Amino acid sequence: MTSHDVVIVGGGHNGLVAAAYLARAGQRVLVLERGTSPGGAAVSYPAFDGVDVRLSRYSYLVSLLPEQIIDDLGLTVRLRRRRISSYTPVRRGDTATGLLVDNEDAERTAASFQRVTGSTRDFAAWQELAELTGRVAQRVFPTLTEPLPSREQLREAVGDDEAWRVVFEQPLGHTLQERFSDDTVRGVLATDGLIGTFADLNDTGLVQNRCWLYHVIGGGTGDWDVPVGGMGAVTGALVEAARSAGAQIRTEAEVVAIDPDGEVRYRHDDAEHVAHAGWVLANVAPSVLDDLIGEASVPPEGAQLKVNMVLRRLPKLADPEVDPRDAFSGTLHVNEDMAQLQAAFEATAQGRIPELPPCEIYCHSLTDDSILGPEERRAGMQTLTLFGLHMPARLFAADHEAAKAEALRATLRSLDSVLGEPIEGCLHTDAAGRPCLEAKTPLDLHAELGMPGGHIFHGDLQWPYAHGEHEPGSWGVATKYPRVLLCGAGSTRGGGVSGIGGHNAAMAVLAQSAGGQRAS
């Protein structure tokens, strides 16, 4: 039996951020992580035997991690911007072409829009929408590490009625229909509202808009950057920051029960232990917290298929105008026209795996080859990270392995449909001669990471303003138990690799410790 100021349940990146802030402030902090190492979904892993490549196995890009947290904690985290935003292979009649968005060459991008859409009208609309979301990003992102504004205060901060309507009030599908004429262009933009989110683009509940918001405001720019060294480098920096400040991090420590009065029971070294604390910070999904407290819970449902690959070389493209290194260094969109996205949503909602599932891909090693071993680098090997949309957990419930195999076959078939050669012929092999390819369904994430339903955000993303039990001026981390706070992706402004949930929970504790506002 031990006593601490704060016990943090879950050693994912948000828990580590909270631990570092609180330990630096003099709090006695214990982090309990059920896995063999901290990091949660933000880890690197040598997934294939005999292949010296450290893949970002689960989460893979960084957008929402504020510079403020990096600076406050002295993190040695380096992020690289991708010059190519995206490439979307398409066919126009018998011609293989593609939409290339180059962040540093507007003329090149405009010419690509001309080839694909037949005019530059949609490119002008693209620029207008980018300017609109850019204004929102500049004004909303800084508020994520401040006490919650009210809805009215956030609207005033945005200061733009049209931007507020487009982002916060009108379904994303309606916006794309009214602003763009080409369905490929609509689809490229729509995917930011569907990452890890199973939704109709025209849903009036606007869950897709909430997802879109968080995908376009990161860093105040909306850029999605590559973590140098992979996600494991981010976790490693956070572990160092927390431990050097005095936090204890105990791995292979599975929490089995939480008493709202501050008692945490966990198993470690084949024995049950008890930790007492003034505060319990839950870096787990809200439904997992309910289970640990003994309350009824309704788990969320994740909706993605993650596929990791190591290639001998990049595949050829059907489009002769684009270098594969450009196409794969940004996000390569596969069968993600808006109509294709909607058809896939309808099929999977009915329990069917689509014939050509929509997905998107990028190659980490083109931007950062430090994740490759020396021999792999010399041989010109590359990594591919594939994220499949609209793959809800329900598809895999009856027979997980059979459905997983079918979903993977369909997804690779979808990828092959836009390439100049089958991806299978480009795969490297491991020490046993097996293709370097692994797939993770929502049920895999549930089993391996404790994410209920495999939901990568621990539940639907929420608007970044006060609502429900969270009052203006609070930190958006409260539960109905005064000494138990959320500090992970399930907090009001959690989700993604951001550290924001951990930062805000730490600020709530420190505010209360200083005799300030209620910790909530």
Image (cartoon, helix red, strand yellow):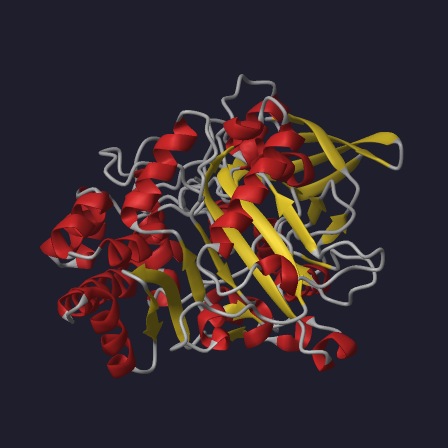
For the point 12% across and 58% down, the residue is: 160
Check the image and report above or below for 297 versus 500: above
Is 363 situated left or right of 149 in this image? right
**Residue at point 54%, 63% (across, down):** 421
Q: Residue furthest right?
A: 270
Q: Which of 61 and 326 lies nearest the eye of the viewer?
A: 326
Which quadrant does the N terminus fall into?
A: top right
Q: Residue furthest front?
A: 94
Q: x%, y% of residue 95?
A: 32, 66
The mark tally for this picture is: 0
The answer to whether residue 363 is visible is yes
- Is residue 9 positioned above or below 434 on the image? above
x 29%, y 62%: residue:
137
**Frontmost residue, 145 versus 318:** 318
Question: Where does residue 25 sit, x and y in percent of width and height?
Answer: 59, 58
Image-quadrant location for residue 123 = bottom left
Quadrant in which residue 476 is drawn: top left
Q: Position of residue 159 (x, y in %)?
A: 14, 59
Visible residue check, residue 503: no
Does residue 20 sit above or below 314 in this rendering? above
Relative image position of residue 376 (x, y in whole percent): 74, 74
User: Which residue: 36% across, 53% down?
Assistant: 192
Quadrant showing the C terminus? top left
